């Protein structure tokens, strides 16, 4: 019964206890974090099972029923997201144990606490059924994220400040839009809002509210042309922060857009301009992301630009406006998180051995780190869209949906970006395959890093093969019947 | 005629993959190669179990996962797939023997990787053969592209890096850029990708769309090396010879031709294509490729490059068979998969044997080599005859059926093209034989006593050459399968 | 025109917030100094708070604290201004303060690393170190 | 750049002005925002929580989860500043530092400071670039500070009946410490509130809030349901909610005080904490 909130509470408790531990018994901070993540993951899985068995779970925080109190509403899609987020955080936390303890040294307790908080924030965003609570959770996730991303080498504070400014503006626009909706309806609860909006006449201000909310979320999710912060923020920071944030932030924001479209505005008539603008921006994001990724020498920045293109995939799918494309976007939220996690984890392991991630620095990796590279190849293949990896199937739905709606440019964008990904990744693989490793290279592959990475990489195949199941059980029931 | 739901197809597909962990973990080279043999024999045994039922007209099916609506990952063993799987797997055994001889004689590096990826390539080829729908076929097709990349780039030098780039660029570029959207469109129009669904109904899409789709699929399966997407094949010849012989004469390229044939018969359907006269597109492209490739082959001095262009030409025979849309034509096309496989692999084996024994790669330097390597060059002669289509070799039979198909459907031009192409085949193969036997050796190392390549490099070409001859007299397993499939 | 004037006069609170917000946004985009950017962010966020608080206003109502706790009469909601926007903005204010704190911390680090807070100078230094 | 910014801003402004069309007028009682849930809060919250201040009731009870997260945000900000600017303890701070030997009066000069010498020991830090403390200022502040803190506690405790509450009280409390640092110096503040203590206090504050919420879970109710408080304390439901609000407000005040002091110490000393201003 309390499973919904119990996915979140261990993380918050973990953050507080890790801070306490940091100033008393600092060796305890890491185990506390690991236990918190593990507990949260356990409850998330339990929640997913119970949601699959009994349908949407609702939790009244403080015992106040909506619309007066705050509720958590977890349907199958959000339960899946919760499992995904907690799992990816857990794997990151386990795989980067050495970094967290060495690199952050005496700050490791604070780092662990912020790690828990950002995960809790993202999970809360997924679970909440209240628009204003969503804003607070966005800020919890973002604020801890700024700190995690800002702690790094020379340029990371600037990149993080840039992210902070843009992210705050995005969140503020979202807040403004929520204010608009509140003023027009008098409610903040998603289900209540949906009821009122469906019953009230369509007005200009309502369109304005939808526009402002979406604008804010687009800014937050780094949709072109608001993507400026992303490559810097993920490309400069410590590998562990990048690995934690990259699979979560943009995907969770896409989740929020989907949630708002299907839970708050299903009956509302969204002005035609918005989907048109969104698909155009999404297509532009795909092209710009691919081209910019091409021009990067640093492989982490390259991955970050691929993320920009991936955001385009998802936004395009959401706004194309048919069931198939929406399915594709929702599936891609899962797929993209998983493959981003694989790639960033692998790159993090490599960066620890090799330092700078320029192409020239990656020679002979296939020989020195075969397992890490095998996982990296799987992640890359998924990004390219090779069956039976997960990335192929979401791309399939997106292509199919785009074709059904006649969005040929978007379709071309998807294909071009796949092809560009082939070039990008094989450029890296060529270096790692053909060039002999330098004399001084002493790469170490430790089982504690390889195991989580291997699990995630294998998950890409497993999830790909069960994508039919995922669509049936988690996604199909969520998309409103009005969307054909 | 019934369908047997059984896990056997999956087991057969997975059999080569089973060898991979063994190959990687083996302590000594002998144990490693034993794994390859074990997997190959297991695969053959599994296929043999299914052959009787398939010959009786039944099919085996197995669904692995329901991934997309109307397009699960599923396997189906029918006559055509069985034919291709039999060819690939039986030649895998022979090639493994040959690889052992070749790789050890040349003292190649990274042999474990080589055998590992070799096994996984066969896995993909069998997977393509047993695919029940376009999606499954695409899956294995893509995996095949990526698992042959390390083989093409085996030498890890600048030349193989360039070849690898070209290879991937063409193969993956076309499969993602052309096949994927075409597949999505087919799924959009028909709601299914299954080969047995009878193809796209005539009214589902207008003829322009169908033409575009056909072209996308025709050129998208670039492994079939239709012009102008054939460029990768000559480039891929930098790979070690066992790779060229099994993959770039049999498994990989025939996967391309196989896919085109499947798509033509299964996805579009003969009726639809004939009604829209789209078969002319197929035969046209095939005829042009056939002649052009043969002409280019004439001018090649590199032995393997000449063989590669010959392969490009011969693959078009198969595509031509698909485009003829008659029973005889289809039979011929399918039969050509096996006949050409045995003939061409013999030639590649011989080229490799020559390279191992003498280090020669160019035709102009092969004068009088027949005296030094009589066994090899005998096998080479038989292989050439089979490719040209002169009895008593298997190549004659497939060409006979193709010619019958042309004449039967009144396509006299195509019949003429076939004959001219065969003449050209003779024109680029017989000079090599002539040089080998009738020119005085101008290289010192070619004269003197008989000094052949190691035994493991000699026996395989002799075996395949022998089979080429036997197939002329006893073509029944393949012929029956092809006939069954064509009907 | 009349229509426009009514718009202007009856909803002047919204005009005010929009103007303030745009000032903040302009400062964030156009100013090169990082501190000024943060000031712009502050103005921007404050404008939104103004907007919210303005939603809560009611003509003739008093602050949202119950005047007489012992009265048995039904409380008339028209007597007190809307408490909810105030609640929400208390949260938003705290969030913006916290954001500002983190931002200032980042600015300090940036100054330590680059020695300046002018964005163009920093970019110049990154390009030609 | 500036022109582009102007255009973007004007466009955004025009968009916002256009979307104003259906907004309620200033002070409109009948606006949707003033009815629906807001009306419920005004009419029912005293009954539910025995808290005359509607804002406090909604903040800490109906939307108590928001407020907990808000406290978490403050806590996060403190941790974030710590992570970003705190210098590692083994990094020495460059500059000129003077230390006076207490018994002899000799002054020692050092070019950099790694850690503060023990204040209770033989050496005392002498500020070189800081004017001598003004007796008037220090004395006045020393006298005022307790009253400020008392007032902070009042604001905290009286949040049920008048504008105030945990955040406001916490901020005032923190301000008293800032005044201490400004009137004396940072070291005086650090001696009063060590880094360790402030961090523990911040975590303890959120834990108090969190623990109040957990009481609900422990009693089988929902998280943050103050019915459990009433149950444990043996009072009526509404009084229990009132008490629950007081508990969580106390937690908020602790965290806010600690977090603001942490941030102030870090920012004013550029991460060294021991030295600064």
Image: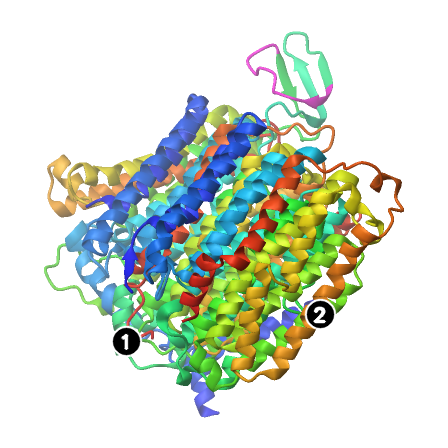
Q: Secondary structure at mark 2?
A: helix
Residue A211 lies in magenta, yes or no? no
Answer with left or right where residue B80 lies relative to residue B159: left
Q: Name the spot of residue D258 as percent of width and height, x first.
A: 43, 35
Above or below, D152 against C67 in this view is above
* Extreme residue toward the bottom, this view: C1
- Mark 1 Cα-neighbour bin, 10 Å: few <14, some 14–19, many ≥20: some
Nearest the eye: B210 or D151: B210
Q: Nearer the viewer, residue A237 or B66?
A: B66
Point out residue B79 in the picture as x, y percentages from the top left corner. Answer: 41, 61
Q: Which residue is mark 1?
A: A198
Give the dominant element type of the magenta stretch: helix, strand or loop.
loop
Measuring from the top left, give residue D114's x and y in whole percent.
65, 21
Residue C2 visible in the shown view: yes
Which residue lies at the image location 35% right of the left edge and 41% below the top edge?
Answer: D252
The answer to whether A208 is drawn above or below residue B163 in the figure is below
Image quadrant in which the C terminus of chain B is located = bottom left
Helix, strand or loop at label 1? It is: helix
Give the chain of mark 2.
Answer: B
Any mark on residue B467, and which? none
Q: Residues within 10 Å of mark 2 (few under 14, many from 20)?
A: some
Q: Which residues are magenta?
A: D110-122
Q: Can you see residue D141?
A: no
Q: Which residue occupies 63% across, 59% down?
A: B386
Dot in front, 1 or 2: 2
From the image, tell me which residue sits under label 2. B423
Query: Chain letter of disc 1?
Result: A
Q: How many marks?
A: 2
């Amino acid at each position: 019964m309390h499973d919904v909130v119990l996915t979140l509470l261990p993380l918050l408790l973990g953050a507080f206890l890790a801070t306490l531990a940091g100033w008393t018994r600092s060796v305890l901070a890491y185990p506390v974090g690991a236990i918190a993540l593990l507990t949260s993951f356990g409850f998330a899985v339990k929640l997913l099972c119970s949601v699959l068995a009994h349908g949407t779970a609702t939790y009244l925080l403080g015992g106040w029923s909506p619309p007066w109190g705050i509720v958590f509403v977890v349907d199958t899609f959000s339960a899946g997201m919760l499992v995904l987020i907690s799992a990816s955080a857990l794997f990151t936390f386990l795989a980067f144990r050495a970094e967290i303890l060495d690199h952050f040294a005496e700050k490791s307790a604070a780092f662990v606490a912020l790690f828990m908080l950002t995960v809790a924030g993202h999970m809360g965003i997924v679970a909440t059924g209240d628009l204003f609570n969503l804003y607070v959770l966005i800020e919890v996730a973002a604020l801890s994220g700024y700190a995690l991303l800002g702690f790094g080498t020379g340029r990371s504070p600037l990149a993080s400040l840039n992210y902070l400014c843009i992210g705050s503006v995005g969140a503020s626009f979202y807040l403004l839009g929520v204010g608009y909706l509140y003023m027009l309806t008098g409610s903040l609860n998603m289900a209540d809002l949906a009821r009122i909006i469906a019953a009230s006449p369509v007005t200009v201000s309502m369109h304005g509210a939808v526009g402002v909310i979406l604008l804010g979320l687009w800014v937050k999710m780094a949709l072109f042309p608001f993507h400026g912060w992303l490559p810097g923020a993920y490309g400069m920071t410590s590998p562990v922060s990048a690995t934690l944030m990259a699979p979560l932030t943009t995907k969770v924001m896409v989740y929020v857009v989907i949630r708002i479209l299907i839970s708050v505005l299903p009956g509302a008539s969204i002005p035609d301009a918005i989907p048109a603008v969104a698909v155009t921006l999404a297509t532009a994001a795909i092209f710009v992301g691919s081209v910019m990724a091409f021009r990067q020498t640093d492989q982490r920045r390259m991955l970050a630009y691929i993320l920009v293109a991936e955001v385009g995939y998802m936004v395009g799918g959401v706004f194309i406006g048919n069931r198939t494309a929406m399915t594709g976007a929702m599936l891609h939220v899962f797929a993209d998180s998983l493959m981003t996690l694989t790639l960033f984890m692998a790159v993090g392991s490599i960066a620890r051995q090799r330092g700078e991630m320029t192409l020239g620095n990656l020679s002979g990796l296939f020989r020195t780190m075969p397992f890490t590279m095998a996982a990296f190849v799987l992640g890359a293949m998924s990004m390219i869209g090779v069956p039976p990896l997960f990335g192929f199937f979401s791309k399939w739905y997106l292509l199919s949906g785009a074709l059904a709606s006649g969005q040929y440019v978007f379709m071309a964008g998807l294909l071009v970006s796949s092809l560009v990904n082939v070039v990008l990744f094989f450029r890296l693989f060529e270096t790692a395959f053909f060039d002999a490793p330098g004399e001084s290279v002493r790469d170490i592959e430790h089982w504690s890093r390889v195991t989580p990475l291997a699990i995630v990489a294998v998950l890409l195949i497993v999830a790909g093969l069960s994508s039919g199941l995922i669509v049936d059980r988690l996604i199909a029931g969520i998309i409103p019947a009005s969307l054909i | 005629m019934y369908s047997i739901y059984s896990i056997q197809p999956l087991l057969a597909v997975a059999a080569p993959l089973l060898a991979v962990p063994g190959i990687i973990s083996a302590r000594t080279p002998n144990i490693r190669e034993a794994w390859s043999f074990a997997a190959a024999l297991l695969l053959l045994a599994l296929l043999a179990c299914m052959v009787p039922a398939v010959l009786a007209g039944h099919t085996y099916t197995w669904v692995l996962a329901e991934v997309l609506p109307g397009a699960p990952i599923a396997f189906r063993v029918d006559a055509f797939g069985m034919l291709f799987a039999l060819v690939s797997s039986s030649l895998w055994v022979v090639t493994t023997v040959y690889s052992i001889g070749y790789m050890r004689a040349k003292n190649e590096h990274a042999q474990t990787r080589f055998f590992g990826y070799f096994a996984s390539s066969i896995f993909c080829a069998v997977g393509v053969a047993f695919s029940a729908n376009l999606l499954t076929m695409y899956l294995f097709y893509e995996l095949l592209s990526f698992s042959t990349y390390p083989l093409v780039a085996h030498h890890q030098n600048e030349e193989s890096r360039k070849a690898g780039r070209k290879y991937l660029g063409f193969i993956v570029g076309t499969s993602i850029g052309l096949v994927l959207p075409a597949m999505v469109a087919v799924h959009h129009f028909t709601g299914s990708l299954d080969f047995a669904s009878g193809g796209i109904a005539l009214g589902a899409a207008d003829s322009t769309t169908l033409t575009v789709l056909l072209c996308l699929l025709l050129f998208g399966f670039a492994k079939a090396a239709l012009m102008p997407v054939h460029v990768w094949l000559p480039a891929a010849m930098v790979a070690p010879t066992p790779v060229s012989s099994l993959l770039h004469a049999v498994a990989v390229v025939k996967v391309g031709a196989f896919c085109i044939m499947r798509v033509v018969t299964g996805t579009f359907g003969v009726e639809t294509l004939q009604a829209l006269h789209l078969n002319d597109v197929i035969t046209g492209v095939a005829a042009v490729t056939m002649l052009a490739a043969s002409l280019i082959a004439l001018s090649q001095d590199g032995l393997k490059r000449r063989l590669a262009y010959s392969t490009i030409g011969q693959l078009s025979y198969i595509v031509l068979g698909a485009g003829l849309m008659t029973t005889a034509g289809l039979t011929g096309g399918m039969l050509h998969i096996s006949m050409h496989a045995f003939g061409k692999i013999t030639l590649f084996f011989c080229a490799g044997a020559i390279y191992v024994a003498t280090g020669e790669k160019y035709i102009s330097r092969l004068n009088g080599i027949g005296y030094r390597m009589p066994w090899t060059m005998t096998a080479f002669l038989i292989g050439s005859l089979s490719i040209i289509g002169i009895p008593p070799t298997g190549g004659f039979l497939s060409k006979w059926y193709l010619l019958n198909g042309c004449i039967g459907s009144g396509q006299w031009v195509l019949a003429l093209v076939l004959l001219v192409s065969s003449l050209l085949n003779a024109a680029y193969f017989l000079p090599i034989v002539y040089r080998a036997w009738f020119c005085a050796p101008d290289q010192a190392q070619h004269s003197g006593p008989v000094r052949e390549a190691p035994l493991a490099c000699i026996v395989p070409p002799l075996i395949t050459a022998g089979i080429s001859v036997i197939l002329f007299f006893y073509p029944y397993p393949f012929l029956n399968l092809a006939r069954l499939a064509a009907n | 025109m009349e229509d426009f004037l009514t718009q202007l006069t009856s909803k002047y609170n919204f005009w005010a917030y929009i103007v303030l917000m745009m000032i903040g946004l302009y400062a964030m985009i156009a100013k090169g100094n990082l501190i000024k950017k943060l000031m712009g962010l502050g103005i921007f966020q404050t404008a939104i708070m103004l907007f919210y608080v303005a939603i809560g206003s009611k003509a003739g109502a008093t602050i949202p604290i119950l005047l007489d706790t012992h009265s048995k009469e039904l409380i008339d909601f028209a007597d007190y201004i809307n408490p909810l926007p105030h609640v929400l903005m208390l949260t938003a204010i705290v969030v913006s303060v916290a954001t500002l704190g983190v931002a200032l911390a980042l600015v300090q680090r940036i100054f330590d690393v680059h020695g300046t807070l002018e964005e163009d100078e920093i970019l110049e230094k990154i390009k030609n170190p | 750049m500036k022109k582009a910014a102007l255009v973007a801003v004007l466009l955004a402004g025009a968009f916002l002005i256009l979307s104003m069309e259906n907004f309620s007028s200033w002070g409109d009682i009948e606006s949707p925002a003033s009815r629906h849930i807001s009306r419920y809060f005004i009419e029912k919250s005293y009954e539910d929580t025995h808290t005359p201040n509607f804002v406090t009731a909604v903040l800490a009870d109906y939307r108590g989860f928001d407020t907990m997260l808000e406290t978490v945000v403050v806590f996060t900000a403190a941790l974030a500043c710590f992570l970003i600017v705190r210098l590692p303890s083994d990094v020495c701070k460059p500059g000129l530092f003077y230390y006076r030997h207490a018994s002899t009066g000799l002054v020692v000069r050092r070019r950099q400071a790694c850690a503060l010498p023990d204040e209770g020991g033989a050496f005392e830090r002498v500020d070189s670039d800081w004017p001598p403390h003004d007796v008037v200022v220090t004395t006045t502040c020393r006298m005022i500070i307790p009253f400020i803190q008392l007032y902070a506690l009042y604001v905290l405790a009286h949040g049920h009946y008048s504008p105030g509450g945990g955040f406001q009280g916490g901020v005032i409390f923190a301000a008293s410490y800032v005044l201490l640092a400004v009137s004396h110096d940072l070291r005086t503040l650090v001696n009063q509130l060590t880094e360790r203590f402030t961090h523990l206090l911040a975590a303890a504050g959120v834990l108090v809030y969190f623990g109040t919420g957990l009481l609900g879970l422990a009693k089988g109710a929902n998280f943050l349901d103050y019915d459990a408080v009433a149950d444990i304390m043996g009072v009526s439901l509404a009084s229990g909610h009132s008490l629950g609000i007081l508990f969580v407000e106390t937690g908020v005040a602790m965290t806010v005080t600690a977090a603001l002091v942490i941030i102030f110490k870090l920012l004013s000393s550029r991460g060294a904490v021991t030295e600064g201003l």
